[in-house]
Amino acid sequence: MVDTTGTEEDYLKAIFTITDSKGFARTKDIAKALGVRPATTVEMLKKLEEKGLIKREHYGPTVLTDKGSRIAMLTINKHKVLLDFFKMILVPLEEAEKDACDMEHNLSKVTNEQLIKFMAFLSHEGFFDIWARKFKDFSTSGKMKPMKFSDEEYYDFATQNMK
């Protein structure tokens, strides 16, 4: 895969999102989405084109190549998993969004895969609801309240909550 910077990944995400809704992305749309000047966007688009991550026409639309799409989707998925995790641990949304954006560019493939598995595990069969209530109690009180049942009872309880 092509080495990309966090900024390049942000551009690819923006192009992906805009293209998903409009079918193509124009320089002004990308600049607006990222809060940068169009001239800054033009320079970045040249770099992304040189790396084979986008196709564009001068004064025309920009679209992602297959490589660019893969990087954009991977970055978007990392962001979503991180954001979901931060919300799960009660990080305020604005902070969670900022931290997810910062971390998505530095998360290794292995860590990302394990985080996805962890989130799936907690979401399975009602475990998340139980875990979230226990964590919220702990987070606000600072006191750990032990669960008073075995793994089998815990599983039964979680399964009942799914119904």
Image (spheres, grey):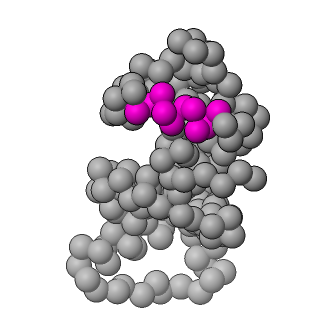
Residue 135 found in image quarter: bottom left
- Residue at coordinates 50% horizontally, 52% vertically from top-left? 6
User: Does residue 102 appear to the left or right of 122 in the view shown?
Assistant: left
Is 75 inside the magenta-drawn segment? no
User: Does residue 122 appear to the left or right of 101 in the view shown?
Assistant: right
- Residue at coordinates 57% horizontally, 32% vertically from top-left? 46
- Residue 100 locus on image (x, y percent): 44, 56
Range covered by the magenta-colored residues: 40-49
- Residue 47 locus on image (x, y percent): 58, 38
Identify whether 147 is placed above or below 51.
below
In the picture as drawn, the residue positioned furthest to the left comes out as 141
- Residue 110 locus on image (x, y percent): 69, 70
Residue 86 found in image quarter: bottom left
Identify whether 84 is placed above or below 21.
below
- Residue at coordinates 55% horizontally, 31% vertically from top-left? 45
- Residue 1 locus on image (x, y percent): 75, 53
In the picture as drawn, the residue positioned furthest to the top comes out as 60
How many marks are shown on the rendered structure? 0
Identify whether 96 is placed above or below 152.
above
* Nearest to the observer: residue 160 or residue 151: 151
Q: Main secondary structure of the magenta part?
A: helix
Is 43 inside the magenta-drawn segment? yes
Q: From where the camera sits, is residue 120 visible?
A: yes
- Residue at coordinates 54% horizontally, 44% vertically from top-left? 8
* Nearest to the observer: residue 68 or residue 48: 48
User: Does residue 83 appear to the left or right of 37 in the view shown?
Assistant: right
Q: From where the camera sits, is residue 24 visible?
A: no
